[in-house]
Amino acid sequence: MKGAEVLGRPRANDHLHWYLTIALPIVLFTDFGRDDIYVGQLHARAQMEQPGCCVIDLFHGARPFDPACAGTLLAALLPHTPPASVLLAIVDPGVGSERLGLALKLGERWLVGPDNGLFSCALSWTDERPQYWTIRAGTAPVATTFHGRDVFLPAVVALTVGDTDGLLTLADASVSLTHSLVAQCAEQDRRVVHIDHYGNVITGVRGAVLDRAGEFSVAGRTLCFAPYFDAVPPGQCFWHVNSIGLVEFSANRASAAELLGLVCGDRLEA
């Protein structure tokens, strides 16, 4: 009898096994930085909401206070994330204001974050027809300056298992700033959207349609195309299409950002 009772007793990890079998991974993209107190709180809250959930740190170095610039980089990174996932993106200088919180469905992928244009390029660059929801206010206390933890993250965890109870359908997408900015993203974003720690200068220009014989004029220099770093002498700057499909200014074994005097947010010459 004791043996039967033991065999029939639910295992302690049954729920965890069930969750990990069906749950979508969470992908994080923020301007929080890795050396501050915020990213860890997102991870901790996710585990409090659902122990054992999968959280992927995609990027936490987006340009602060600039949803449009960060949004171009996010759109380029999105194809390199799991298609069935829930992405939480936070670059939110309007946190605590009346701006909407959005959940967007693109195929199997959810995008969750503020309605400030952060997702506009992602919507412009896809053939998927988006579905719009707003996030329903919960009953738990909310810090007015940390909606990422207190508003968006609980909604994200719920969506990993298909729970949409915390969402409200947005019947008229035109009231969304995200929707209204989509058309602008059809144009090339001729700005520096990120500089990596090597000094590679990542622009918002999509490289798929560019002529490799073309040149870029940058800071009084003419940059020609090269397919990889060692194709030019050490210290020489060149342009190429990087691994996420954006035009990048680089230098062989040197910092192109320092050589060209560029910083994130700079606009390219016409």
Image: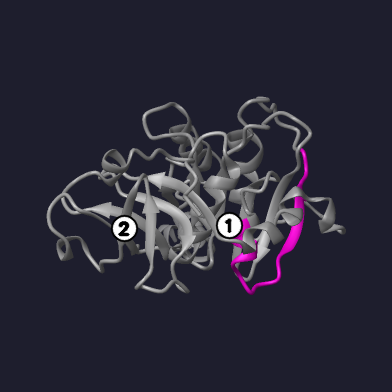
**Does residue 150 lie above or below 20 as drawn?**
above
**Does residue 212 lie above or below 123 as drawn?**
below
The residue shown at (61%, 29%) is 146
Asked if residue 131 lies in the magenta stretch, the reply is yes
Q: Residues within 10 Å of mark 2 (few under 14, many from 20)?
A: some
Point out the tag, 2 or 1, that comes first from the N-terminus: 1
Q: Label 2 is placed on what type of residue?
A: Leu
The residue closer to the viewer here, 43 or 22, is 43
**x%, y% of residue 269?**
47, 50
Q: Label 1 is placed on what type of residue?
A: Thr
The residue closer to the viewer here, 175 or 258, is 258
Asked if residue 187 lies in the magenta stretch, the reply is no
The residue shown at (38%, 49%) is 218
Q: Is residue 10 visible?
A: no
**x%, y% of residue 228?**
22, 65
* Numbered badge on residue 223: 2
Point out the stretch of residues depicted in magenta.
121-137
| Left or right of residue 62, residue 159 in this image | right
Question: In which quadrant of the rendered view does residue 87 lie?
Answer: bottom right
Question: In which quadrant of the rendered view does residue 198 lie?
Answer: top left
Q: Residues within 10 Å of mark 1 (few under 14, many from 20)?
A: many
**Does residue 13 lie above or below 198 as drawn?**
below
